[in-house]
């Protein structure tokens, strides 16, 4: 799990204000009952988020060598406000597991399951921590905005991340300008949904898509050379025409199809040969590349079931 990068992860609960409003409405004019309910709610929130973190840490420990230090450090566990540091390769999986474990907690007063959003700032180990923390907060806010487009009630747990290579721009919006190809199309899927309520499907903008594609590219057995993928990454930044040209010129279309077809099927998506023409699709009304995130992340990613040893 050697990596020169570390991740700062910020997680914040969704729609907590709506839950408080529900308590006020249920208590009515009974001030004592309202105060007691708010105290109980606060305690439940603290316990639920701590339990989610504890279970996540236990899951990480199960797959780490016994003689190695746990690659995880909690920084803030204050109610629904959570921040921790993790080794970069397991950062996305830690965030996924936390959100899944949180959804399994028993919420206060029979309210809907808890949901939250995560922002993951992947930075070099020498990167200024305060800047990484600010970026993680911004990424968390970005995930929340995306989640609200899928469900206005805050029931979507979403995630956003960024790998910082030293661009040092002022904010996330400026960083994301680098993910607009020269022809105006987007090369990222982020933010993505991790958990959604019944009947709400994120389609391609699902963490499962990025996860399965990362695994497929890593397990291609050399059929998809890393060197070619790095050149493809540059072609994708040029846009659809350049990407289509490179795929043909490098004879990469068929090996890529073989590597990712099963991954996309596992993510529940319809796979056609047309997907591999230039690797762009119309998603949420704009052209987006469905594989760039996975190509960029694959060197900093370990699927949790593969962490062992």
Image: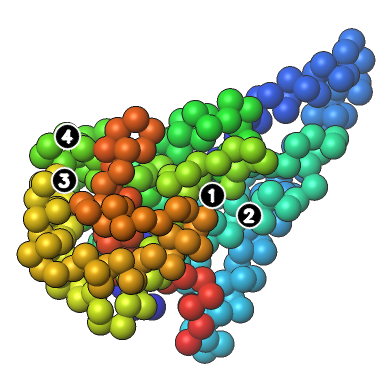
The foreground one among 17 and 81 is: 17
Q: Secondary structure at mark 1?
A: strand
> On the image, numbered disc 3 is attached to which residue?
240
**Disc number lying in front (2 or 3):** 3
Looking at the image, which residue is at 62% across and 71% down?
Answer: 59
Percent from the top left, x then y, of residue 302? 42, 71
Find the residue positioned furthest to the top.
29
Quadrant of the image occupied by residue 175: top left
CA distance for labels 1 and 2: 8 Å
User: At x 63% / y 54%, what residue is drawn?
Assistant: 100
Which residue is disc 2 drawn over?
100
**Precedes in sequence: disc 1 or disc 2:** 2
Image quadrant assignment for residue 154: top right
Q: Tags 1 and 2 in contact by the CB under 8 Å rule? A: yes
Q: CA distance from mark 3 to mark 4?
A: 10 Å
SS for dot 4: loop
Q: Nearer the viewer, residue 209 or 137?
A: 209
Q: Which mark is residue 277?
A: none
Question: Are the residues flagged by discs 4 and 2 in contact, CB closer than 8 Å?
Answer: no
Residue appearing at x 73%, y 53% in the figure? 104
**Of callouts 1 and 3, which one flags the residue occurring earlier in the amino acid sequence?**
1
Q: Nearer the viewer, mark 1 or mark 3?
A: 3
The residue beneath circle 1 is: 194
The residue shown at (26%, 47%) is: 280
Cα distance, mark 4 to mark 2?
35 Å
Above or below, 190 against 34 in this view is below
């Amino acid at each position: 799990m050697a990596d020169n990068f570390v991740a700062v992860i910020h997680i914040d609960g969704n729609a907590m204000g709506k839950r408080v409003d529900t308590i006020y409405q249920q208590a009515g004019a009974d001030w004592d009952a309202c105060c007691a309910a708010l105290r109980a709610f606060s305690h439940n929130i603290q316990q639920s988020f701590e339990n989610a973190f504890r279970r996540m840490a236990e899951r990480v420990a199960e797959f780490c060598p016994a003689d190695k230090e746990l690659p995880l450090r909690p920084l803030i566990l204050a109610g629904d406000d959570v921040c921790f540091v993790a080794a970069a390769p397991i950062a996305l999986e830690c965030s996924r597991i936390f959100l899944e474990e949180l959804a399994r907690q028993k919420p206060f007063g029979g309210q809907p399951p808890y949901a939250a959003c995560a922002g993951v700032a992947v930075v070099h180990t020498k990167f200024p921590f305060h800047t990484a923390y600010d970026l993680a907060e911004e990424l968390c806010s970005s995930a929340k905005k995306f989640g609200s487009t899928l469900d206005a009630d805050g029931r979507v747990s979403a995630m956003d991340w960024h790998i910082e290579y030293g661009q040092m721009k002022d904010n996330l919006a400026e960083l994301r300008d680098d993910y607009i190809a020269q022809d105006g199309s987007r090369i990222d899927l982020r933010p993505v949904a991790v958990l959604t309520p019944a009947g709400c499907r994120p389609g391609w903008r699902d963490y499962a898509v990025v996860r399965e594609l990362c695994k497929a590219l890593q397990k291609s057995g050399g059929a998809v050379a890393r060197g070619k993928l790095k050149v493809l990454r540059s072609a994708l930044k040029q846009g659809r025409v350049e990407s289509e040209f490179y795929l043909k010129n490098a004879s990469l279309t068929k090996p890529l199809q073989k590597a990712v077809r099963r991954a996309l099927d596992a993510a529940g998506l319809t796979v056609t040969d047309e997907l591999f023409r230039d690797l762009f699709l119309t998603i949420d009304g704009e052209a987006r590349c469905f594989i760039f995130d996975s190509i960029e992340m694959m060197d900093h990613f370990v699927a949790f079931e593969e962490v062992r040893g």
